[in-house]
Amino acid sequence: MASVRADAGADPKDYGPAAGAILTVRDLSVEYAMDSGAVAAVDRVSFDLYPGEFLGIVGESGCGKSTLLFAIARLLAPPAAITNGSVAFKGTNMVAMTDKELAPVRWRDLSVVMQSAMNALNPVTSIGAQFKDAMKAHGVTSKEEIAARSAEVLQMVGIDPVHLGSYPHQLSGGMRQRSMIAMALLFTPELVIMDEPTSALDVVAQRSLMVHIKKLQEELHFAVVFVTHDMSLVSHFSERLMVMYAGQVAEYGSTREVFDTPRHPYSVGLLEAFPSIRGERVPLTGIPGRPPDLSQPQHGCWFAPRCPRVMDLCRDTEPDLYQVRDAKVRCLLYTEAERKEADRG
Amino acid sequence: MSMPLSGVTTVGEPVRPGVTGPAKRPATHALARLTRAVRSNRKAAAGTIMLGIFILVSIFPGVIAKDNPGADIYKPRLGLSTSHLLGTTSFGQDMWAQVVYGTRDVLIIAFVVGLATTAIAVIIGVAAAYLGGAWDGTLGVITDILLVIPLFPLLIVITAYAHGASTLVLIVVITATSWSYTARQLRSQALSLRSRDFLEAARVRGERRFYIIVVELIPTMTSLIVASFLTNALYAVLFASSLQFIGLGDPNAQSWGTMLYWAQNEAALQTGQPMWAIAPGFCIAALGAAFALLNYAFDEVGNPALRPVRRNRGKRAR
Amino acid sequence: MRYALRRLGFFVLTLWAALTLNFLLPRMMPGNPALAMMSKFHGELGPNALHALEILFGVNAHQGLISQYFSYLHQVATFNFGTSLSQYPQTVTSVIGGAIWWTVGLVGITTILAFLLGTGLGVVAAWRRGGRLDSIMPPVFVVTSAIPYFWVGMVLVLIFALTLHWLPEQGGFNVTSDTPGLSLGYIGDVLQHAVLPAFSLLITTIGTWILTMRNTMITTLAEDYVRMARAKGLPGRRIMVDYAARNAILPNLTGFAMSLGFVVSGAILIEYVFNYPGVGFMLLQAVQGEDYPLMQALFLLITVAVLLAILVADVATALLDPRTRTAG
């Protein structure tokens, strides 16, 4: 159901994989085929990821961030399908590959950590058996090697290898999550994508897990794409940050830039929803309105109905991504013309 | 008469990306989905048409069958002809008339038992879920016991002691024994819906429990209730015809099951009158199929994942 | 362990309920059917047989209801179900003993076949979503699951026995030409006579298994751990069996066991159509001959069989699902 159109990018300098990048996503679009028509869950998302880099993707529920992750890892299932764009991983376009061609890449070079380990681990087989599965699928057959490596990765995440014989429901939530991460590191892949791995944990466990992940990342040098709805949590650990809204990239840049100086009114709203513990007391502001209904296409900016800085122009002009210093922002406030106006005024 | 299908597996709005608005008023939403489902789903359409035909025939049998089904005035064992569309029985009765007039009996059983059984199941299932505690425990045990005891043998035993059952007795007896399966299903669903937001909202508004159950909860369960009705109607038809077939119905009643009883008694198959057995049996199968198709279509409405999927050969990019 | 005890308790309770039903029904029905039966056979039975019947049915009872009940339970516990009235002078137990193996064979083999084929086809159909198997199967089996058992039997008899003369139309074996025994001829004859009944039973029961398995499998395939298995690059076969089917089958095991009740019901009707000498056929003969002792005993037997099947399914679930073991 996918067609790969390599020419769809708007900006000429977005062609082809970026030099040195381990993951280059260009104009990736995903649609869900619903009874009422196709719904674009991910709309022309592009970014580059370099080896060892940590990219955080934030947004509210339904903004398409998990769909984006699964599209990158080629784990979508009907009715979802990639309809456009490319995902160049280590130089090869994964979108055009068949399952058979993908199999060797899976887990060896690219692994996945999901949100709820209780749901992501097979409930009827032991942890050790699930590690063994993955290893045998990639040609590791020696029993000693499998046992040794399984024990090794568990120790890396601070779990006693005796738990290899345990079933998922016998472990605590935090341990389950960490064993999932251990499983993801079996082959020391170059890229690990994580879909809200901390959301199912309590606050304390969240932070401890993040610290652990960051430490492992520094030791083993893998790149991370980390999806979450918690902007402040991820910004402590990420080098680059992407904010998504309605399946599109709303803002994207270095964490410093995006977090310290959010420009897209949605990013601003997200940040202001989490008051700083040390800062001065400010009234809590949420973002008024509801998440958009993606089955009703908009003519202008998706965020216009809820935007505190909306202009008339926003309702019928679709904004592109505009470069502002170290970030790209999909907001008409930041076109060349508007910025000159702002500078002047 | 095989085991009931698993019924509706999930109910509630199907998950759609990007659509996270507040739940629409459950009743109208469910009704709209139902009508749309019937129109778009091929199985539902087929089932509805078949059922419609049977209903029409049962209300106006005289329109397509000229003869009195009980009148044994013809030459016996005639074959198919234009004056006797299905031939005559060994008693000289017109078979076509018997089949046509027999529709009414069967449909009455199907609908009355279906409705009554579903009503009982709703009351017991929802009460068990809502009252909880000891009520739930006791009702649950009773339901489970009835679930396990094989129904058809039980029906045989009961009707045997009664020396045969008229249509009314059949209805009562079948209703009294077959509500447990759907009661269980409804209880599970009621339990899972109990903690949903819109019910919580009604509680907070101060509505009385009875109001919440009847006005808020039950309409949300519409598709499961309709599916239960269809399942129960189907089993009513099968049980009743089977009982009549083995002679435990009223042999003088005008029904498909009794036709089969006489056919078997008169060795219809062996004496070259196959239509006597084939025709009514086919009608039972057709009516049953109508209910089953509608039921299955409802399964697909409740769980969109079950709907037919267009598969592309060869594993292209996904 | 607690779970096991609770289940056992439930079985005992259900058995008790069935026994009590058996006890109460003849006494509750209008027209006192037991009395009618007793007077019909009065002259033919010896005093012991009469006494057993009185206890079973409460006729000429000099005891109150409660003490009748306990006498009844005591008698049942000693497997004394009285004398069969239609197969006099055999006892009920011996009549059942003669018939039970025919039904066990018929139902047993059909159930196993239906289960294996049904779950296998269901799993494969769901795995190949949208393929030819998956699009044809649901409507076909939805329809077949609604067809009355006996009609399928009759149609098959008409086609294969009466028209084509390929297979015998009735009986367990050819009564006129064979004597029961372990001769090849006899066994061959038995098998020949079993084909049509078994096939009828198979056609009508397999549909539900296939569809339930398919539906559960579809839901399971949407689970995160299946996606995770794909992410690990595991071969398709392995995902289908170890991750999906193994999980999909669990909730269905008990359901399959409970459906045994329906399979037995079907067997009753099929045995009737084919004059197949199993317990179902006996039951209907008992009904027609007003042989209530035999009828009661068969009803209990069938209930016990279903209970046993559920017990087996429970044990199987516990073995296959590690979560139930620690839940206790």
Image (cartoon, coloured by chain):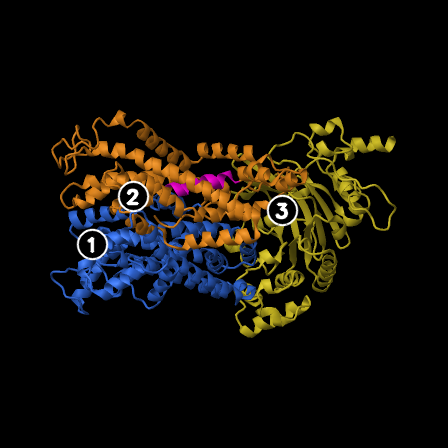
Chain colours: A yellow, B orange, C blue
Indicate the amino acid at tag 1.
Lys
Residue C80 or A60: which is nearer the viewer? C80
Q: Which residue is mark 2?
A: B165
Chain ID at mark 2:
B
Q: Is residue B223 magenta?
A: yes
Residue A5 or A170: which is nearer the viewer? A170
Height in image: A54 above or below B37? Answer: below
Mark 1 element type:
helix
Q: Is residue B210 left or right of residue A343?
A: left
Rendered residue at 64%/67% (across/down): A153
Mark 3 element type:
helix
Which x, y percent locates residue C68? 35, 61
Q: Is residue A107 visible?
A: yes
Q: Find the magenta span and give its range.
A: B221-233
Q: CA distance from mark 2 to mark 1?
A: 21 Å
Q: Which residue is mark 1?
A: C40
Which x, y percent locates residue C226? 53, 55
Rendered residue at 52%/59% (across/down): C234
Chain ID at mark 3:
A
